Amino acid sequence: MHAEKNSTGAHGGADMPPAQQEASSSEAVENPTFVPFSLLDPAVDADALIQDHGIDPGKTVDIFPCTPLQEGLFSLSLKQPGKFVMQKILNLSPDLNIKAFRDAWEAVCWDTPILRTRIIHDEATMGFLQVVVQEGVPWHEATDLGSYLEADQGRPMGIGQPLVRFGLVKNEEDVYVSFVWSIHHALYDGWSLRLTEALVSQVYSGRESPVNLAPPFQYFLKHIEDARTADADAFWKSTLDGCEGTVFPAARPSLQPAADTLVEHRILFPRLDTKSTDDTMGTWRFDSELHRYNSHPLLLDVELGSQEIIARASFDSRFIAQDGLRKLLSRLDRVLQQLTRADPGLTLAEVQMLDDAELTQLWDWNSVVPEPSKLSIAEIFQQVAQTYPSRPAICAWDGQLTYDELDKLSTALAAQLVHLGASRDEFIPLFFAKSMWASVAMLAVVKSGAAFCLVDPSLPSQRLDSIIQQIKPSLLLAGAENEHQGSELSFFGPDGTERVFPLASTGKLDRKALQAFGASFSAQEVSNSRADLTISKEVASTETEKEMQQIWAQVLEIEFSTIGLHDSLFSLGGDSIDAMKVVSRARRSGLALAVADIFQQRSLKQVAQVCTKVAHRPARIVTPYSLLSDVSDPRELEQYIAEQCQLSLTEIEDAYPCTALQEGLLTLTSRQQDGEYTLQATMELEPTIDLQRFQDAWEHVSESLNVLRTRIV
């Protein structure tokens, strides 16, 4: 059990083993000890912030900002729960010592702060923050791997929640056969993943104590903070000015990418010079459901083996066909084979992308070239009308026309259009409901030599105005029921200015420039423009709807009266960051809500319906000796501790049980007399250091952190 010397301090936790300090031996020479909370804005109330996110301040080691990549990955997973969460499966060896296996993982977790990190959001100043806590990683057990994986996918990894989980699966003989490591991509990359696995293997095999030699993550954040980002931004902006990147597969604004298919391709090579590691714990299994945590249209995962490269493509079949992707992977194989065996003088132009079968197929497709028609569409139609004059050409709800009747009506209308000035290189808008007259008008425009543009009369007037401004017609055709709409359309905006859409060098709409233009508007301006388009809005009626309306207005900084029940946070100018701010404010108001709910439910009314009222639970206060419920006489125990530690009774603050991991580590230390599980961090002092201030700083930290004043008896 622990025995603490009297002191007070906000962030002293007692769950962490004494040997598992945050400092590492590698930083002793190159870097001074990193001061906890030094990257946090002094204006941030750390205790209140982490309590708002359900985290115990007494178990908080440090708080610091997230990297931009972490923010992006975490935001996407909030938008689509389950995305960017890996489930890595280890098929356990039959002779595995399960207790030593668990101890190895827990020891590595205690020594690797990133595995004990959670992400919270401070809407006031700093945005996303990562919190390192003194809590072990949760373990779960199951008897069926498939059921466990499905249940594990349903466990959220959201704001303030653990981002790492472990699972053990037994078979029917009650033998552990599988280990599942669930971790959010904001905490790892491919390189760190392998380092962690190797460290666990070494600790399990007894080849290395669980002291992670990697420098603290805070140093990387400090590097990003100190980097000259303005110079980098200026360089890339000038270098890529005017560059139009190719997006593959092409995105569709109306579709949210969600990978649903996985294709694997193995590229074989002569044996590579790689070192194999003997892992006595088991073998890692490839996750065949890689697409579950991919929210992009296409993601390519490449794994290097001793004799092969395994390329796995996780993709959305709505954006790219499976057969087409298999061909792309085959071409990648062909290109890599050529490059690895090629003469150094080979140019990229000489690399063959297609194999013989594909070239043969292309020639077969083009072996018979059809004769091009020299007739226009109008002339072809006239031939058909002369051949089959009495056959029905149009059968519509409002009438029928034969080919001969259609030919005569369209010819008469075409002559009228030519008389009015219709000519080549001109678009004529057609305002027709579904009717036989729409077909007459289309054929008439073609006969006149112009081109037509079908316009839906039901579109809002602003959209109709926009279409007309783009094509700038001199003529317009409308059905009798839509004549008033055609006459009301103007070529210019209400203020007399002509609206021009930005075009790329290809002549297509420059969507990036348009998005940048739209991003320049404030949320209030977006809301006002929507208000102009809306006749009336349904007002909030329930208490939850009104409260959510006020929260949206505060986050978006707009008038709450401009927000209707059927408005979406995003249509009002909000984004994923605003969605997180809404969730944070709702939590403080006693409303439980997930970021994914805002993306899925969309409207204010639907979001309010999924909100649930929650009671605010204050942080639990643990009084001294309250965790020793089985001790009959605390005074007798206190006297025993004082004798064992050679302390006076007034110097003992509290006593409580050790964790299982602490007991295990201390037992191992007592058996091995060579300093195992004991860290010695050495710091080379500068000649100019103020020794008194240096000692005072350490004394202050020791007084603040209870764990540094802990003994075990």
Image: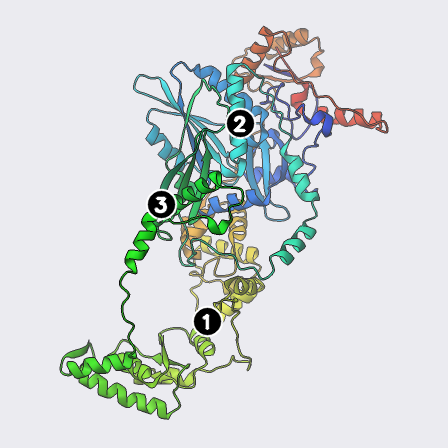
Q: Tell me which residue sits at (60%, 7%) in the image.
A: 672
Disc 1/disc 3 C-alpha distance (Å) = 47 Å
Quadrant of residue 335 in the image? top left
Above or below 151: residue 122: below
- Per the image, label 3 sits on a secondary structure element best described as helix
Q: Amino acid at mark 3?
A: Arg
| One can see residue 40 in this view | no
- Per the image, label 1 sits on a secondary structure element best described as helix
Q: Position of residue 206 (x, y in %)?
A: 54, 14
Circles 1 and 3 in contact, beta carbons < 8 Å: no
Q: Tell me which residue sits at (70%, 23%) in the image.
A: 7
Q: Nearer the viewer, residue 23 or 412?
A: 412
Q: Which residue is mark 2?
A: 196
Disc 1/disc 2 C-alpha distance (Å) = 56 Å
Q: Earlier in the sequence, mark 1 or mark 2?
A: 2
Q: Quadrant of the N terminus?
A: top right
Q: Amino acid at mark 1?
A: Leu
Quadrant of residue 367 in the image? bottom left
Relative to 294, is 616 on the left or the right?
A: right
| One can see residue 350 in this view | yes
Q: Position of residue 369 (x, y in %)?
A: 28, 65
Q: Which residue is mark 1?
A: 533
Front: mark 1 or 3: 3
Disc 2 crowd, CA 10 A, few/some/many (<14, 14-19, 20+): some
Q: Which residue is mark 3?
A: 326
Disc 1 crowd, CA 10 A, few/some/many (<14, 14-19, 20+): few
Q: Earlier in the sequence, mark 1 or mark 3?
A: 3
